[in-house]
Every structure is written in C-alpha cells, then in structure tokens.
C-alpha cells in the first residue's frame, strides 16, 4: 500500500428518520474506506447499503490477500489493477443488491449510493455512484474527488417534456445512478497522487446538505479525526438533522511520494464543470 493513514468514522440516525439507512466501512489494513447511503421503502435502503459495504469490503480484502501471497505479485500490483479491483467490487455489490431486490418483495426497488477511497501506490483512488461526496483537503483548500450523479449535474438527461417542472433544489436530490437499481452500474473514478498531510472526507448528503464544504474543511483541520466526526454530526443535527448523517475522515500520515503538493494529474474525459474543480485522472 505504501501509504500510512489514520481514520475515524461515525453514522447517526439524525433527528427525523426512523431508521439509519447509511452504512460505512473503515479497513485501515488494506486502505479501504466506504460510505453508502441506502434508499427504498420498509427499511430496504438499510439492507442495500449494508450489502454494498459488505460486498465491497469482502472482495477487496480477498483481493489484497491474494496479491500479497508472493512478493512478485505485490510489486506488480499497480494503480490500474487496484482501480480495476475496486470497480469489480462495486459491480459485485450491484449484482447482489439487484438480485436481492428481485427475489424479495420487501426489497423491491432498493438501491444505494457508494463512495469509496482506496489507497494504493501513493495514489488516492476514489470511486462513486450517486451523490455521496468525497472531498480532498490539501494546502488549506477543499476539492471534489467525485462526480455527483444527480439531474442537477446531468441536465441533458432531463426529458424536454419535463424541463422547468423541477426546482434546482429538487434536481439536486434526484439520482441518475445508484448501486442495485439496475442489472449494470456505471462507476466514476478519480486517481490523484497522494501526499503526506492530505485529508480525505467521505460523507452522506445528510452531512453535506447541511454543512458547506468550507465549513467541513475548517472543522476537520481544527480537530482530530474523532472530534471532527462528532462536531460535524452535531452541527448537521443542529441544523435540522432531517437525514441520516455519516462521515469518514482519513488523514494521510506518510507516503513514499514527492513532497511537492499539487492537484495536477492526468485528466481523461473530464466534464467541463468538474475540470474546474480539480485536475486529476478520471475514469468511468
């Protein structure tokens, strides 16, 4: 992995919902961090998010163990291979959730967002489906490491007959992608060089919908990881707490990378609106 990191996370039901349909995973031994925000009636969203983090965690753990069986395999493991494994783990989660939704009437139509961070070869690999944010805090700035899959950001998918019928606020909450709602899923990836003192924050929209990115940056930079999670959760609840609130804070303690800190990376097929936010290598 070549990266030393420390992380903390928490998940809170909020002040309105009757169940917590968020799930999260922290596996520091393999450098994997996942947030999933489930959706569906009769607590099916809770099932979907839990299935997602379990499938991704199990697959990535098994893959990491296999790759470390021999020194040659471990050396051969590169960023491209790590990204492909992460893609396969989310594909597996999608397949399992979709199958369960077809077999169980109570789970019909369930799905979940997935936002994941994987540390490999001095690289931050992020993957996302849905709108759960992933932020990079570096040099006092906060940048997006995800693509929001909402109608607000993908307006071209709105049928002409429906144009003008939704406010921007509503468009921001209508997902164009989710894990488990279809037989196949598209996943977006960003690969960014990792540096010591980088901080990555993954959260559900129960947090990001109540706290601005700059406020998140300030609270995280001014507190240790555990305290930051608690203060962010408390603030989201103070501002209404209408949704479940989940957050993971990952602090990079050391890497074998260049000490120079920039967001410059390879950019492939990046949309104009997101290119203005960061310069990294993006895959889909």
Image (spheres, grey):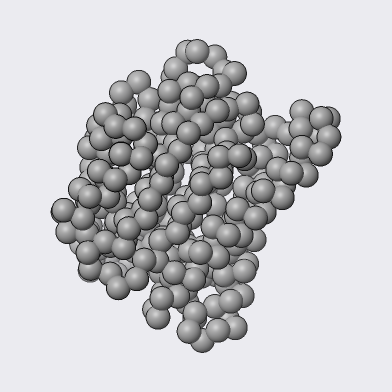
Q: Position of residue 37 (x, y in %)?
A: 41, 60
In this view of the protein, which residue sits in the foreground, 261 or 25? 25
Q: Position of residue 135 (x, y in %)?
A: 38, 38
Q: Position of residue 235 (x, y in %)?
A: 20, 48
Residue at 50% over, 51% down: 25
In this view of the protein, which residue sits in the foreground, 36 or 181? 36
Say if 121 sits above or below 230 in the image: above
Looking at this rendering, what residue extends furthest in the bottom direction? Answer: 105
Q: Left of 284 or right of it: where is 250?
A: left
In this view of the protein, which residue sits in the foreground, 173 or 107? 107
The image quarter containing residue 92 is: bottom right
Looking at this rendering, what residue extends furthest in the left direction? Answer: 239
Please indicate, yes or no, whether residue 281 appears anywhere in the rendered image. Answer: no
Q: Left of 143 or right of it: where is 97?
A: right
Q: Position of residue 101 (x, y in %)?
A: 54, 78
Residue at 37% over, 55% down: 11
The image quarter containing residue 213 is: top left
Say if 135 sits above or below 19 in the image: above
Q: Left of 91 or right of it: where is 181?
A: left
Say if 112 sits above or below 213 in the image: below
Residue at 73% over, 34% down: 77
Image quadrant where one finds the N terminus: top right
Please indicate, yes or no, whether residue 251 appears anywhere in the rendered image. Answer: yes
Q: How many marks?
A: 0
Residue at 60% over, 53% down: 57
Q: Left of 178 or right of it: where is 239?
A: left
């Amino acid at each position: 992995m070549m990266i030393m990191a420390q992380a903390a996370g928490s998940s809170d039901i909020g002040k309105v919902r009757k169940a917590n349909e968020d799930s999260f995973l922290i596996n520091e031994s393999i450098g994997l961090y996942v947030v999933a925000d489930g959706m569906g009636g009769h607590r099916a969203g809770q099932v979907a998010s839990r299935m997602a983090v379990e499938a991704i965690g199990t697959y990535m753990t098994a893959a990491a163990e296999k790759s470390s069986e021999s020194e040659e395999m471990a050396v051969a493991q590169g960023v491209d291979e790590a990204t492909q494994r992460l893609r396969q783990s989310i594909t597996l989660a999608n397949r399992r959730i979709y199958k369960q939704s077809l077999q169980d009437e109570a789970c019909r139509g369930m799905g979940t967002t997935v936002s994941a961070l994987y540390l490999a070869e001095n690289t931050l690999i992020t993957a996302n489906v849905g709108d759960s944010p992933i932020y990079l805090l570096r040099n006092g700035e906060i940048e997006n490491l995800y693509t929001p899959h909402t109608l607000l950001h993908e307006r071209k998918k709105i049928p002409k007959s429906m144009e003008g019928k939704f406010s921007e606020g509503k468009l921001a909450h209508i997902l164009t992608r989710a894990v488990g709602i279809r037989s196949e899923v598209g996943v977006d990836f960003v690969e960014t060089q990792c540096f010591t003192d980088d901080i990555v924050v993954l959260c559900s929209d129960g947090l990001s919908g109540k706290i601005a990115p700059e406020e998140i940056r300030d609270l995280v930079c001014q507190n240790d990881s555990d305290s930051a999670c608690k203060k962010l959760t408390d603030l989201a609840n103070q501002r209404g707490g209408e949704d479940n609130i989940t957050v993971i804070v990952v602090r990079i303690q050391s890497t074998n990378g260049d000490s120079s800190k920039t967001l410059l990376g390879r950019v492939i097929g990046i949309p104009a609106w997101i290119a203005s936010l960061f310069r990294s290598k993006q895959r889909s």
